[in-house]
Amino acid sequence: MPSLIIHTDQSLNNIIEELDFKKIEETLKQIFIKILDAKEDKCQIIWINSRIITSDYKIYCELKFRETYYRNEFKRKDCLDNIGKIIKKIFKVKVRLRSFSINQSTITALDI
């Protein structure tokens, strides 16, 4: 599962136009695989261009993943730290990151 949603402020559009998203996403997926023991075909990354009005953080990242014994607090923090370093290096702005583990029994997924 891991699902990473990245909200970027519209003020970063000039940077976004120059990015190689495939390369960035591959790097992020490798973090999921290495740190969270994720399967590559289950990793999801969604970029959303947003209007962030009052926050000093121009990028907001939200990571959701299935709760497992392996994905302890240390692994979760390590994963967010690695994601944050990559995003901050690319955009050179403050990044806010949050993670949420979800119990397997509460997940329902559908692709249409």
Image (cartoon, rainbow, N blue to C red):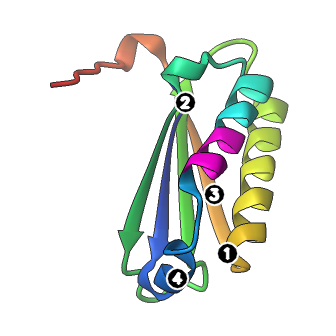
Query: 14 and 101: which one is in front?
Result: 14
Q: Upstream in the sequence, badge 1 or badge 2?
A: 2
Q: Which residue is mark 1?
A: 91
State if disc 4 and disc 1 touch (CB < 8 Å): yes
Quadrant position of residue 58 = bottom right
Name which of mark 4 and mark 2 comes first in the sequence.
2
Q: Which mark is residue 12?
A: 4
Q: Amino acid at mark 3?
A: Leu
**SS for dot 4:** helix
Distance (Cα) linking label 2 and label 3: 14 Å
Compared with 27, 61 (above or below) is below
Range of magenta residues: 22-28
Classed neighbour count for the residue bearing mark 4: other residues with Cα under 10 Å, few (<14), some (14–19), many (≥20): some
Residue 7 in the image, given as x and y percentages of width and height: 46, 64
Crowdedness of circle 1 by 10 Å Cα count: few (<14), some, many (20+)?
some
Type of amino acid at the residue the image marks with label 4: Leu
**Is 57 left, or right, of 8 in this rendering?**
right
The kind of secondary structure the magenta stretch mainly shows is helix
Does dot 2 land on a helix, a strand or a loop? loop
Percent across and percent down for residue 112 are 15, 25
**Dot 3, crowdedness within 10 Å: few (<14), some or many (≥20)?**
some
Dot 4 or dot 3, earlier in sequence: 4
The residue singled out by tag 3 in the image is: 97
Secondary structure type for disc 3: strand
Q: CA distance from mark 1 to mark 2?
A: 23 Å
Distance between mark 4 and mark 2 Cα atoms: 25 Å
Tell me the residue that label 2 is attached to: 2
Q: Residue at x 36, y 18 (%)?
A: 106
Foreground disc of the pair 4, 2: 4
